[in-house]
């Protein structure tokens, strides 16, 4: 097992990703090292967003990896494999689990997990990856500013042992990571697309031109979302360039 081969637990951190980066600056860290905590004082999400989590209620962790087989232009596949692994774990407990592009995990229409991938790149090589995740396990109340949050306990009315959940999700991540290092990238690509929220379904979106009806037809190797409109025109978007309505 690569992922989880070493675990570092710290009761409270500003951010597990930040602590992982700190360890890497001090020297080489064993691949698969997991940093996990009960509470983050400054949990981070995509594009500077914060991640809310009550003390001891959820999973908050980061993993250090050295994905040498991935070139910089294909770094989004790391986000894909983590999205799939979290979905694999959550779908063993509840149904209707999807990946909302680029890497939020939702159940039906509500967000249950988020991912923050940070890659250090030298020339065209990935020197290391810090992959952080927050999964809502037992939290039942969220701030009013949170957008459509949910948790396993909300969905099933059952509490969960966070240690058992962590062991299981790390195993699922390890399985997906091995698919990457053993050159099964096409499987990761096809699985990711098949679980994309609203894939190949007509629905409303909003971009700089306004509201339109379209369907998601692809996610490029670089992670850009492709949407086809009713006139068969295909538009391509980066993160935060299109909204799901």
Image: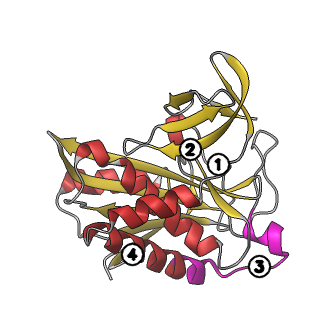
Query: What residue lies at 53% left-to-right and 81% top-to-bottom?
Result: 168
Kindly check if marks 2 and 1 are in contact, taking CB atoms under 8 A apart as contact. Answer: yes
Q: Secondary structure at mark 1?
A: loop
Q: Secondary structure at mark 4?
A: helix
Q: Categorize mark 2 by other alpha carbons within 10 Å: few (<14), some (14-19), many (20+).
A: some
- Per the image, the residue denoted by label 2 is 217
Which residue in the rendered view is the most extreme toward the left?
A: 123
Q: Earlier in the sequence, mark 2 or mark 3?
A: 3
Q: Position of residue 91 (x, y in %)?
A: 65, 73
Q: Is residue 222 magenta?
A: no
State which quarter of the image contains the C terminus. top right
Q: Is residue 12 visible?
A: no
In the figure, 160 relative to 137: above or below?
A: below
State how far apart marks 4 and 2 are (Cα). 28 Å
Kindly check if marks 3 and 1 are in contact, taking CB atoms under 8 A apart as contact. Answer: no
* 227, 145: nearer the viewer: 227
Query: What residue lies at 70% left-to-right and 47% top-to-bottom?
Result: 201
Question: Which mark lies nearer to you, 2 or 3?
Answer: 2
Q: Is residue 162 magenta?
A: yes
Q: Quadrant of residue 205?
A: top right
Tell me the number on the disc at residue 200. Answer: 1
State how far apart marks 3 and 4 are (Cα). 25 Å
State how far apart marks 2 and 3 are (Cα). 37 Å
Query: How many numbered callouts?
Result: 4
Q: Position of residue 167 (x, y in %)?
A: 50, 81
In the figure, 242 relative to 75: above or below?
A: above
Which residue in the rendered view is the most extreme toward the top?
A: 209
- Per the image, the residue denoted by label 3 is 159
- Per the image, the residue denoted by label 4 is 174
């Amino acid at each position: 097992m690569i992922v989880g081969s070493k675990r570092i637990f710290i009761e409270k951190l500003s951010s597990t990703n930040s602590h992982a980066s700190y360890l890497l600056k001090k020297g080489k860290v064993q691949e698969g090292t997991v940093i996990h905590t009960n509470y983050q004082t400054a949990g981070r999400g995509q594009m500077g967003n914060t991640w809310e989590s009550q003390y001891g209620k959820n999973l908050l962790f980061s993993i250090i990896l050295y994905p040498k087989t991935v070139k910089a232009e294909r770094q989004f596949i790391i986000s894909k494999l983590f999205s799939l692994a979290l979905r694999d774990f959550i779908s063993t407990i509840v149904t209707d689990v999807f990946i909302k592009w680029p890497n939020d995990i939702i159940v039906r229409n509500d967000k249950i997990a988020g991912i923050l991938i940070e890659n250090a790149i030298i020339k065209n090589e990935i020197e290391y990856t810090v992959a952080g995740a927050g999964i809502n396990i037992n939290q039942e109340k969220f701030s009013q500013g949170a957008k459509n949050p949910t948790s396993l306990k909300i969905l099933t009315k059952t509490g969960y042992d966070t240690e058992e959940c962590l062991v299981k999700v790390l195993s699922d991540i390890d399985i997906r990571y091995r698919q990457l290092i053993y050159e099964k990238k096409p499987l990761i690509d096809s699985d990711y697309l098949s679980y994309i929220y609203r894939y190949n379904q007509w629905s409303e979106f909003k971009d700089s031109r306004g509201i339109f009806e379209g369907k998601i037809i692809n996610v490029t190797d670089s992670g850009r979302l492709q949407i086809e409109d009713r006139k068969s025109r295909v538009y391509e978007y980066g993160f935060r360039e299109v909204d799901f309505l």
